[in-house]
Image: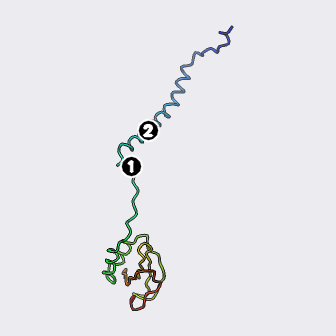
Amino acid sequence: MISQSIIPIPKNSMLRLKTVSSLLTPLILAGMIGLGDVALHSFLPQTQSTAIAAPPSASQEQIELIIASKGKTGSGDQLRRFFYGDLEPLGVQPGGAGMVVNLYSKKNDVTFSYCATYDVVVAVKGGRVAMFPASEVK
């Protein structure tokens, strides 16, 4: 009597196994690829992507280079290169070839007066300077 209550195994059970295995194969392959990627990155750290670091903050030497080249062609380019992302505008005043912009560096506590018409730095002073004397920015 007990043997009659057991569910008989159908004749097409091989068909069910093939269907299940075809579903599991992509999952197993994806898992193996993921594990291989983790293993590759742990043993070969140079293959990991690295973030680009921010440029180092300007040093006193760089400020002195700008002071030495103020009023000369290229000093505006130096200013942008040395203080990339660090300058905040304080104001605009007459000078240079019309108007100059006063730019302040928080990291170095220095204010630069920049003439965009000729792309030159016309004045540099320590601290936060809203307006330079007219004689300095002509």
Which is more N-terminal, label 1 or label 2?
A: 2
Residue 81 falls in which quadrant of the image?
bottom left
Residue 138 falls in which quadrant of the image?
bottom left
Point out which mark residue 128 bears: none
20 and 83: which one is in front? 83
Query: What residue is shown with label 1?
Result: 48
Can residue 47 be seen in this snapshot? yes
23 and 132: which one is in front? 132
Quadrant (top left, top right, bottom left, bottom right) of the N terminus? top right
Vertical side of 6 occupied by 129: above or below: below
Vertical side of 94 occupied by 106: above or below: above
Residue at the image point whose x is 35% and y is 72% from the top: 59
- Residue at far top of view: 1
CA separation in Å, label 2 and label 1: 15 Å
Query: What residue is shown with label 2?
Result: 35
20 and 129: which one is in front? 129
Expressed as whole percent of the image width and height from the top left, the position of residue 29 reads: 46, 34
Secondary element at tag 2? helix
28 and 66: which one is in front? 66
User: As shown in the figure, which amino acid type bears the numbered disc 1?
Assistant: Gln
Expressed as whole percent of the image width and height from the top left, the position of residue 49 reads: 39, 51
Residue at the image point whose x is 52% and y is 24% from the top: 18
